Image (cartoon, rainbow, N blue to C red):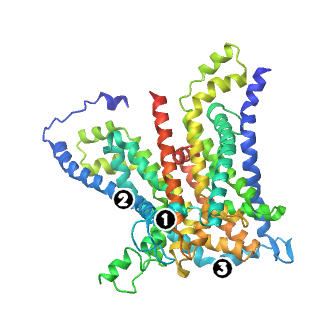
Amino acid sequence: MTILEATPARLDPAGDGRSRSGRRGGRLGERLLHAYTWLILLWLVLPIIVMIVFGFNDRVGKRNNTWNGFTLRWWGELFAIPDLTTALVNSLTIALLSTAVATVLGTLMGLALGRHGFRGRGGVELLMFANIAAPEVVLGASLLSLFITMGVPRGYLTILIAHIMFNISYVAVVVRARLAGFDSSVEEAARDLGAGPFTTFRLVTLPLILPGVASGALLAFAMSIDEYVITTFNAGSTLTFPLWVFGATRVGVPPQVNVMATIIFVVGVLLALGNALLLRRRRI
Amino acid sequence: MRRRAGALAPYFLVLPGGLWLAIFFVVPMAVMLSVSLQTGNVVDGFTQTFDVGVYADAITTYDTQFIRSLIFGLIATVATILLAYPMAYWIAFHAGRNKSNYLFLVLLPFFVSFVIRTVSWKFLLADDGIVLGNLKDAGLLPADFHVLATSFAVVAGLTYNFFPFMLLPIYVALERVDPRLLEAADDLYANRRGVFGRVVLPLSMPGVFAGFLLTFVPATSDFVNAYVLGGTNTTMIGNIIQTTYLTNADYPLASAVSFILMAVLLVGIFVYARLLGTRDVLELSAR
């Protein structure tokens, strides 16, 4: 890098302006890429816009696939389908519970990996890597094999176990990534001032890593509430929101699903923005 | 005394989460292997026979679906690279202060369930839906034209759903490129193609590799897109695993199919991780 730094930035001995003409061509290219970026963004949000808009569609008959005028009916009749409501409640409570457990377990793992060198650390990293990289369908199928072999009936509890399993590694990775640049001298200072390990953790370490923990928890919650593949293998007859929707695809999805998904989307976006603002404020 | 407690601390921290992963992730893999070597049926029960013939059965019965999954996964992954690279490039080098805002927009689909996004595409692309229906009414498309139930629909769905997994690692790699290197290349009379081909592209390859891994594995093993957007001719190996386990309850065969899929993908993953370093892949996937 030192050689590069020593090179004068505007060295152009021939003075033929080659680089400048290059820039002009670059400006057109840059504009095209800018437009392209927005085109892709449009493609990414198109199904979400359609989902939101058709939650306001005054549909006729069983199929919700042509626009028939604006209505707020489905927002008023949001809980008119009891099975769907139950599935949504299951999704929310499973997401909350699995996030709580996975955040605690994942944060502890993230702390160990981010702060300590220890024997077997490579093995733990490999375990987490394999867990994140393994295909979901295999994670779901193998867990089902365990439950079948052990004679464990599938239902709410097995879904919860599965969700905690796939969330731990994500929380650990996020927490560890945020530990980069963590100044451990403040902990030593606390210990020198007579604080025990738990007091130090509660009063010094935890407040410092909290934004990372919050990001990990948000990610875990978002993954849990959306998860379909692993859940379908371990759900038995219990339904979550994505499972109910999947089951309804062949007969037609009712507009209540659009409304519920819209609410989840808006709340999720607001939470993420809140977390981002919190992080930004912390940094200043 | 304190020193010893300090040396043990990381183990206490890792233990609860590590145990959970061991019991509900590692052990199930071993159990699945053992189930695949059983013989029997749901009514009479299964016995451990160590009959490896089931693996040959799995491959010969479902070779079409295995190959189709690999091809669909590969096409979708290459498509995401081609679509994501220019966008990642623009965000990394030209978005200025708005970089994080653009990335947030890229992540918006993740706030809607994977299943619902796919259902939304089915709705958009339906034979008599808001796009095709209107085009047909206007006489711009023949009445029997359809997108759903084709290979194109499934690959397009896979490309859509896993696009952010490709864009983010490519972006991270491009973001790390030191702008002074570009200036240096420019000063040394490289034309723009030269700067890109000899400086930017090689430096961004780790991002492309990580993106390839993060996209190819879930795309190849997916069954939601094939179920929702595809038809009987687009069945993927994930669909086979799902129906064999949950509908046919042929656990040994389903386990064997899952195991083959995992072996094929994991061997690929670990060759990759060796070339790249697991830490990099993990770090990139965390962002």
Q: Do labels 1 and 2 touch, CB within 8 Å?
A: no
Q: Earlier in the sequence, mark 1 or mark 2?
A: 2
Whether residue A208 is visible, yes or no, is: yes
Rendered-image quadrant of the N terminus of chain A: top left
Residues at marks 1 and 2, CA–CA distance in whole angstroms: 28 Å
**Quadrant of the image for the C terminus of chain A?**
top left
Q: Residue furthest left?
A: A16
Output the chain of dot 2. Answer: A
Q: Chain of mark 3?
A: B
Q: Which amino acid lies under the numbered mark 1 shown in the image of this protein?
A: Arg
Q: How many marks?
A: 3
Asked if labels 1 and 2 share a chain, the reply is yes
Which chain does the residue under circle 1 lie in?
A
Give the numbered dot on residue A55: none
In the picture, measured across the screen, residue B148 lies left or right of residue B58, that is left
Q: Secondary structure at mark 2?
A: helix
- Please indicate whether residue B82 sits to the left or right of residue B235 in the image: left
For residue B246, above or below residue B203: below
Q: Quadrant of residue A227?
A: bottom right
Q: Secondary structure at mark 3?
A: helix
Given residues B140 and B7, the one toward you in this image is B140
Q: Estimate the x, y position of residue A29 in percent, counting from the top left.
A: 24, 53
- Residue displayed at 51% across by 49% down: A267
Q: Which mark is residue A42?
A: 2
Q: CA distance from mark 2 to mark 3?
A: 43 Å
Q: Which residue is mark 1?
A: A73
Q: Amino acid at mark 2?
A: Leu
Q: For residue B25, which quarter of the picture?
A: bottom right
